[in-house]
Image (cartoon, grey):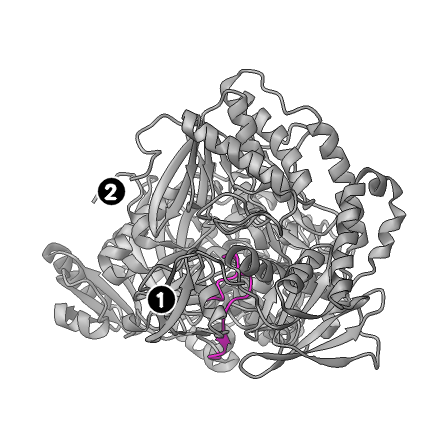
């Protein structure tokens, strides 16, 4: 499955290094690393990861470089991207 | 199929019709509701669910609003807050300039004299209530009586209770004609339904929302009810970011305005669902349902001006509604002398959700022959000299 | 700043760069138009021809057709007759005085593209039916399994169950098997042998049947069982999928008592046909119709023209039918859109009309062979989540239908919130419409689907982008 000659670099998920092949989405890199979920729902706190894989369902949301609600299945990974687990709405900083 | 003859026919299963059905059924009346569409599918579904005393100047509408705010609290206790998504959150009105702050303080003084609970706020007081508010505010006011319901859910819950008290609801059933006796008194309606082609009752209530003018015309008692379009923006789900209903003092001026042009004055609030609602625009464009990016843009810009964090929050959807208004901006509530037995309960403009409870309560008192808690004279249906302006 | 600002409107804008959109763009260029090709992805191909940059096409069907179209797009770009707007997510389309304005998001910023005529080639996504456990991580749409594999070289799991209905399950399972995953089984809820009842469609589309037989051969070689009238009725696991419950179905898709069994797996890929992306035709006010597969689609005439002047549709947006049909429709739409914009005659390539009618006959046969009856509703428990975004359960939906008198999907949505979340009902809309129709003892109507597919804002847009739209602020 590994592409020959594709550039490889790393992103981080909650500080841990994740290898990426050039062109992969953040979701693909997380799945390839064995992860299945990187978000919890705001209602029941259930874990979620990729469902539709093409940007339709908004299940694979992640916080990327501090920006919440990024669809990981659409976002092409860039070297050094810092991805973090997203709890609920991803907007906890604005809560009062 | 109806087995007994109703005492009251209610036209419209929106918030006003549902409130009337609930109040009358609770008073022991047999009620039949006829609705041409679905429950809460018309005027009500375009609303925000405001129960406000803060936006009203002293006068008959404020008295109605105060009574209604009290009645809504009772309904929430009776039916359960969750079944209405009733939130007694209170309202915060914000003045962006010293002049506006002074005008607001003067309004508050008059409202206080009329029985409204209101506290003047300085900038620090505002930030204490709403920490995310923009820093360039001059002052404001706090109205603890303001509340909110989810209008569609509230309508459905009121109707459920009415049904358990014996009311019948005929959805998908349009009134095609009114039936009057030789003396001109209302005796019932004809419908387009095969199941209930005709309903007879000594009382008929017109609670058809923005389309109440059409219903009134059908009854031969024209009313000048016109649509005013309003858009509401809905954000992505958020934690609690806005604690109360927050709006700018300009809103009060716009509510009372007769200007046909687009007016926007921002009203912001959180919901149980987590979304933040951003209103309110007002324009007279008939029943045009076309999305207006210009309205959306202005509301978004004003919302960010009031709550800067909203700049990074996403708009998820928009919806629009048609607020039924009369030329004098007062609702029409009461029996029509032109057709005894016909009662109008309409023209509440953008305050229909809030005023529904009092409207229903007062009409139930009228129908059951009990003394009224409030004088309905200011709302009487025959107060209009010229009623040619009925929507097509 | 985008390449479109400050320039005159394009003659034709094509939204979607899959098979239909590429064909439309290339044909419109050939017809003498200045063309904008707008797509949310970073490169052309759509879901069907999703690929990695150095892909040799070995795993793709009709790859030479893609290379030809991409070559023509590249040549037109070089010649200055086509401008590609990749990475543009269109969130609203509106009619302006003399053209159409497409509002898009690019990397979180706003962009506007103007064009005199439009080809909507927005494609489709997997249609889903809810079932207990379907929100567990490790349950994917069939399209997700495909996208991760073709676009990223990543397998969704090592023991994968593929289930649902329709021919698309076969390439998904085959791709996974060839990539080294153990496909535990392909479970087709329907009984596709019904297809044989359409001999004309079969004869005119022999190549497709050969293709299907090829998939089945590959699956056999990998020892993958293919079972019909069978599906996944529950995904099992705590924090991720560890197994699936499989059951045999009767013709209406009720579970055959005693047929249930559990299979260990680490991924489930499901799809029950496709749902066309129709928010843009709905925003423009195009007349819609209910297609034979139960999808809401844009009504088009012989020239692929919608009921709104200057707006054309091609591919799944006007009827699910696969890539070859989409290409033919794209060619016809591209030519018609070019003439509509420039006033000069432009023709579709020779044979396009014939390929379209053959493709439609095949699609019709497919739709009739892979219908979705109502028995799936019996797989649900009151706790089963129907709306994934707002976590609305089947029990709550039932409560508002029975207790609060919700008689249509809009009422259910307003009372109980399914479809109110970030995906705006794209995933749960079909199921919600089916549940409320069943509750009312009727079939799903176009009006039901219209109510749930109407999205004035097609993608979440930052309020700062909305506030920055061109316009006067009186304050």
Q: Main secondary structure of the magenta part?
A: loop
Image location of residue C106, percent across then percent down: 37, 47
Which is nearer the eye, C203 or B392? Answer: C203
Please give the name of the residue rendered at 82% of the width and 66% of the height, measured from the top-left corner.
C229
Can you identify the residue that label 2 sits on?
Answer: C473
Image location of residue C64, percent across then percent down: 61, 39
* On screen, residue C419 above or below C268: above
- Quadrant in the picture for residue C150: bottom right
Is B87 placed left or right of C168 in the picture? left
Instruction: Identify the secondary structure beneath mark 1.
Output: strand
Q: Is residue B43 magenta?
A: no
Q: Residue furthest left?
A: B98
* On screen, residue C256 above or below B43: below
Can you identify the residue that label 1 sits on?
Answer: A10
Please give the name of the residue rendered at 55% of the width and 39% of the height, measured from the top-left corner.
C285
Is C247 placed left or right of C338 in the picture? right
Q: Estimate the spatial distance between the alpha carbons at disc 2 and disc 1, rounded to whole Å.
A: 45 Å
Task: In the rendered structure, find residue B259 and report the number of the disc placed on it.
Answer: none
Image location of residue B76, percent across then percent down: 46, 78
Instruction: Identify the secondary structure beneath mark 2.
Output: loop
Q: Residue furthest front?
A: A4
Which is nearer the eye, B2 or C43? Answer: C43
**Tag 1 subunit:** A
Is the N terminus of chain C in the top left, top right, bottom left or bottom right quadrant? top left
- Would you say residue B58 is visible in this rendering? no
**Range covered by the magenta-colored residues:** A44-60
- Would you say residue B83 is visible in this rendering? yes
């Amino acid at each position: 499955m590994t592409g020959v000659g594709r550039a490889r670099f790393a992103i981080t998920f909650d500080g841990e290094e994740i290898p990426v092949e050039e062109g992969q989405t953040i979701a693909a890199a997380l799945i390839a690393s064995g992860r299945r979920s990187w978000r919890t729902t705001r209602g029941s706190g259930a874990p979620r990861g990729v469902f539709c894989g093409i940007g339709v369902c908004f299940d694979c949301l992640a916080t990327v470089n501090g920006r919440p609600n990024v669809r990981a299945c659409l976002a092409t990974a860039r070297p050094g991207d810092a991805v973090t687990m997203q709890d609920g709405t991803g907007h906890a900083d604005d809560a009062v | 199929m109806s087995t007994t003859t109703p005492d009251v026919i209610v036209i419209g299963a929106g918030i006003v019709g549902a409130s009337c059905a609930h109040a009358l059924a609770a008073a022991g009346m047999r009620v039949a509701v006829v609705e041409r569409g679905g429950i809460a599918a018309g005027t009500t579904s375009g609303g925000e669910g405001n129960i406000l005393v803060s936006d009203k100047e002293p006068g008959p509408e404020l008295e109605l609003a105060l009574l209604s705010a009290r009645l809504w609290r009772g309904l929430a206790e009776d039916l359960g807050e969750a079944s209405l998504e009733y939130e007694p959150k209170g309202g915060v009105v914000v003045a962006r300039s010293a002049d506006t702050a002074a005008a607001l303080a003067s309004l508050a003084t008059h409202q206080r004299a009329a029985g409204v609970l209101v506290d003047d706020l300085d900038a620090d007081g505002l930030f204490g209530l709403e920490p995310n508010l923009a820093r360039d505010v001059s002052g404001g006011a706090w109205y603890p009586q303001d509340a909110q319901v989810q209008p569609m859910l509230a309508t459905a819950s009121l109707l459920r209770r009415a049904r358990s008290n014996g009311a019948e609801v005929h959805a998908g059933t349009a009134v095609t004609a009114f039936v009057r006796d030789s003396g001109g008194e209302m005796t019932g309606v004809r419908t387009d339904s095969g199941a209930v082609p005709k309903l007879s009752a000594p009382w008929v209530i017109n609670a058809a929302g923005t389309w109440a003018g059409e219903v009134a015309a059908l009854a031969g008692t024209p009313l000048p009810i016109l649509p005013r379009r309003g858009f509401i923006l809905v954000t992505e789900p958020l934690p609690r970011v806005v604690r109360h209903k927050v709006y700018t003092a300009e809103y009060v001026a716009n509510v009372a305005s007769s200007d046909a042009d687009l007016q926007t004055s921002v009203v912001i609030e959180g919901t149980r669902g987590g979304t933040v609602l951003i209103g309110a625009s007002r324009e007279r464009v008939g029943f045009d349902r076309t999305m207006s990016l210009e309205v959306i843009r202005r509301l978004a810009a004003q919302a960010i001006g009031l709550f800067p964090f909203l700049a990074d929050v996403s708009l998820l959807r928009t919806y629009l509604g048609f607020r039924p208004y009369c030329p004098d901006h007062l609702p029409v509530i009461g029996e029509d002398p032109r057709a005894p037995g016909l009662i109008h309960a309409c023209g509440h403009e953008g305050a229909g959700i809030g005023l529904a409870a009092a409207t229903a309560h007062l009409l139930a008192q009228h129908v059951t022959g009990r003394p009224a808690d409030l004088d309905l004279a200011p709302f009487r249906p025959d107060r209009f000299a010229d009623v040619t302006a009925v929507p097509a | 700043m985008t390449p479109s600002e400050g320039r005159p409107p394009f003659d034709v804008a094509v939204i979607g760069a899959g098979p239909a959109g590429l064909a439309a763009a290339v044909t419109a260029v050939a017809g003498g138009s200045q063309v904008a090709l707008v797509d949310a992805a970073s490169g052309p191909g759509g879901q069907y021809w999703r690929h990695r940059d150095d892909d040799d096409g070995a795993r793709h069907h009709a790859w030479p057709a893609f290379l030809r179209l991409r070559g023509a797009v590249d040549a037109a770009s070089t010649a200055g007759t086509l401008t590609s707007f990749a990475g543009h997510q269109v969130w609203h389309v509106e009619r302006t005085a003399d053209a159409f304005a497409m509002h898009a998001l690019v990397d979180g910023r706003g962009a506007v593209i103007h064009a005199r005529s439009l080809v909507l080639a927005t494609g489709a996504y997997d249609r889903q039916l809810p079932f207990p456990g379907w929100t567990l991580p490790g349950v994917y749409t069939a399209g997700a399994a495909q996208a991760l594999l073709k676009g990223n070289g990543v397998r969704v799991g090592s023991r994968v169950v593929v289930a649902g209905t329709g021919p698309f399950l076969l390439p998904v399972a085959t791709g996974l098997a060839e990539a080294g995953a153990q496909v535990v089984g392909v479970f087709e809820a329907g009984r596709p042998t019904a297809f044989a009842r359409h001999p004309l469609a079969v004869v005119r589309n022999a190549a497709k049947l050969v293709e299907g037989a090829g998939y089945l051969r590959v699956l056999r070689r990998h020892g993958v069982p293919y079972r019909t009238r069978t599906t996944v009725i529950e995904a099992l696991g705590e924090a991720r999928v560890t197994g699936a419950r499989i059951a045999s179905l009767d013709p209406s898709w009720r579970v055959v008592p005693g047929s249930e069994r559990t299979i260990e797996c680490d991924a489930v890929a499901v799809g029950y046909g496709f749902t066309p992306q129709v928010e843009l035709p709905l925003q423009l006010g195009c007349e819609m119709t209910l297609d034979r597969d139960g999808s809401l689609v844009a009504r088009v005439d012989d020239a692929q023209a919608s009921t709104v002047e200057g707006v054309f549709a091609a591919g799944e947006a006007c009827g699910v039918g696969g890539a070859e049909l989409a290409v033919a429709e794209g060619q016809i739409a591209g030519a018609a859109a070019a003439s509509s914009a420039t006033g000069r005659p432009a023709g579709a390539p020779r044979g396009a009309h014939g390929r379209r009618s053959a493709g439609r006959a095949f699609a019709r046969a497919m739709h009739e062979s892979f219908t979705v009856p109502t028995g799936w509703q019996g797989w649900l428990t009151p706790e089963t989540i129907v709306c994934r975004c707002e976590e609305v359960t089947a029990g709550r939906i039932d409560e508002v239908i029975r207790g609060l008198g919700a008689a249509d999907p809009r009422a259910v949505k307003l009372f109980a919130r399914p479809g109110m979340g970030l995906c705006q009902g794209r995933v749960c809309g079909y199921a919600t419409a089916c549940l409320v129709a069943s509750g009312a003892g009727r079939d799903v109507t176009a009006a039901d689907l219209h109510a749930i597919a109407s999205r004035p804002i097609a993608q979440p847009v930052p309020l700062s982008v909305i506030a920055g739209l061109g316009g006067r602020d009186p304050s």
